[in-house]
Image (tube, rainbow, N blue to C red):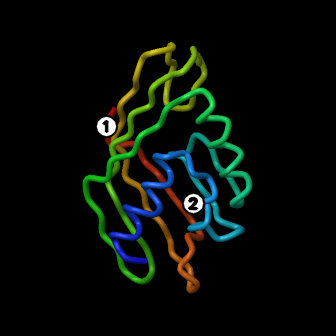
Amino acid sequence: MTKEEFLKNYIGAFNRGDFDGFTRFYDANVVLDLGGKKRLEGRAAIRRFYEEVLQRIEERLTVDRLVLDEHGLACIVRTEFKAKEDWPDFIAGEIRRGESIFIESFIFYTIGPDGASTEICTARSRG
């Protein structure tokens, strides 16, 4: 995977809500750690999680920095979460319809030999 492919095909698919598009970058047994708040195991679990979130939240990712080699990818991502409805116990914080939460995160992807992500770890840096 190149930086351009990551930005266009992965981040672009995520921002469009294209579940098939962004989850194809995951190994079937991928593990996603959302800053220690939630751990998801498997491509299907991640997809189900985001299907639920994106029914209630408009989520937009903007990548500020990106470092990539054959073993992994690290990036700094700004995320806007805009509520479609009130969600008092949303993972990023309480939010009301029409409001937005802005956070910045460090995201680290471990890339397996077939090019798919096997582990994703996130940590909030701001917000």
Q: In this picture, is 61 found above or below 13? A: above
Q: Position of residue 50 (x, y in %)?
A: 62, 43
Q: Kindly check if marks 2 and 1 are in contact, taking CB atoms under 8 A apart as contact.
A: no
Instruction: Quarter of the image for the C terminus: give it.
Output: top left
Q: Which mark is residue 21?
A: 2
Q: Which residue is mark 1?
A: 126
User: Which mark is first along the chain, 1 or 2?
Assistant: 2
Q: Position of residue 63 (x, y in %)?
A: 31, 53
**Residue 89 in which image quadrant:** top right
What's the residue at 30%, 64% (across, down)?
Answer: 66
Q: Is residue 122 above or below residue 71?
A: above
Query: Callout 2: helix, strand or loop?
Result: helix
Question: Percent from the top left, x then y, of residue 33?
Answer: 57, 52
Q: Residue furthest left?
A: 64
Residue drawn at x 47%, y 66% is 109
Q: Residues within 10 Å of mark 2 (few under 14, many from 20)?
A: some
The residue at the point 58 percent across, 84 percent down is 114
Q: Is residue 98 left or right of residue 116?
A: left
- Kindly identify the residue that appears in the image at 49 percent across and 46 percent down: 16
Residue type at mark 1? Arg
For the residues labelled 2 and 1, the Cα–Cα distance comes to 28 Å
Left or right: 69 in relation to 57 = left
| Quadrant the N terminus occupies | bottom left
